[in-house]
Image: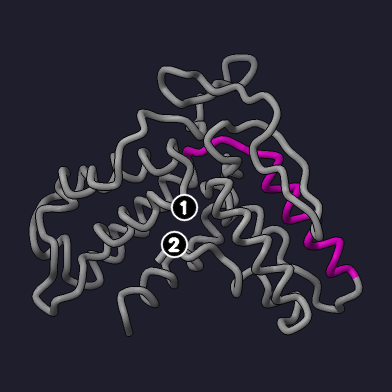
Amino acid sequence: MTSQARLAGLLLALTPLVGCGAGDAGGDDGGSGGASLGGSVSTGSGSGSTAAASGTSGGAGGAEACVGPDGKGYASDACDATNVGRFQTCPDETVPPALELCRAAHEVFTVGAWETLLACLGELPATMPIACEEPEASENVEACLAEVYREVCPNPAVDALCEAIADRCAGDAKGFAVESCQADLVPFNAAALDAYESCVEEATEEVACASLHTSCLPPLF
C-alpha cells in the first residue's frame, strides 16, 4: 500500500470522530456563505467572528473558543523546521506520514486549521520509530487530524454546500452522504471546496450519489 493510500484511509476513518465539531472551511476570511450546484459556491463571504490576533473564535456566553480560518500564515516549509521535518525520508525511501500530511494540508486546509495541525505534529518526538514505523506513524497522524477536527470552528458554508449536493441527489434511492460531507470538509479552504464541488458536478452522471463524497474528497494525500 502506498503512503498516499494509507493516509487517505486515515482521513476517511476519522468520519466517526469528527462529528463532535463541524469546522470552519470557508477559506481565509471565514464567515457564512451559500452554495448552489451548477453555479459558483460562496465558501467564505460575509462576516466572520474570528479574532485577528489568534485566529480563534469565541462563542457567545463564554463558550469555549475554537480555531477560526485565520492564523500567522507560515509557509509550507515550516513543516521542515519542526520535529516533523527531522527525517525527510524513511528507511524504505518513503516520506514520513506526518511530514507528507503537513505539506499536503498546507495547500488545502484553512490557515488556522493547518497551523493547529502543525502545532500537533511538531510536538511528536523526533525519533525514527515515531516518524516511520507502523502502526505508530499512522496513529500519530490520525491523532493530530482528529485534534484539528475537534478544534476548528463551525462554518455554515460547508453545511450549505453539502446540503445543496444532497438536494441534487434527492431522487437517488441511496442518497448522498451529507453528514460525512459536512464533517469531513470542515478544515478545508475555499480552493479545496471549489475543487470538491467541481468534482461532484463532473462526476454526478458517472458516479452514484452514495459514492460521490468519497470520490471527490480534496486530494489531501
**Place of residue 113 in the rendered image (x, y in percent of width and height, measured from the top left):** 44, 41
Identified by mark 2, the residue type is: Leu
> Which secondary structure class fits the magenta region best?
helix
144 in relation to 181, above or below: above
Residue topped by disc 2: 220
Nearest the viewer among 73 and 180 is 73
| Picture residue at 16% right of the left edge, 53% below the top | 85
92 in relation to 55, above or below: below
Quarter containing the N terminus: bottom left
Nearest the viewer among 54 and 33 is 33
Q: Describe the element under mark 1 as helix, strand or loop.
A: helix
Q: Describe the element under mark 2 as helix, strand or loop.
A: loop
| Picture residue at 70% right of the left edge, 68% below the top | 200
Would you say the residues marked 1 and 2 are in contact, meaning their CB atoms lie under 8 Å apart? yes
Q: Residue furthest front?
A: 39
Residue topped by disc 1: 108
**Place of residue 118 in the rendered image (x, y in percent of width and height, measured from the top left):** 30, 43
203 in relation to 45, above or below: below
Q: How many marks?
A: 2
Identified by mark 1, the residue type is: Val
Instruction: Rate crowding at label 1 as few (under 14), some (14 to 19) or many (20 or more) other CA atoms within 10 Å.
Output: many
**Place of residue 173 in the rendered image (x, y in percent of width and height, measured from the top left):** 86, 78
Quarter containing the C terminus: bottom left
Nearest the viewer among 157 and 29 is 29
Q: Mark 2 or mark 1, which is nearer the start of the sequence?
A: 1
62 displayed left or right of 8: right
Q: Residue furthest top?
A: 61
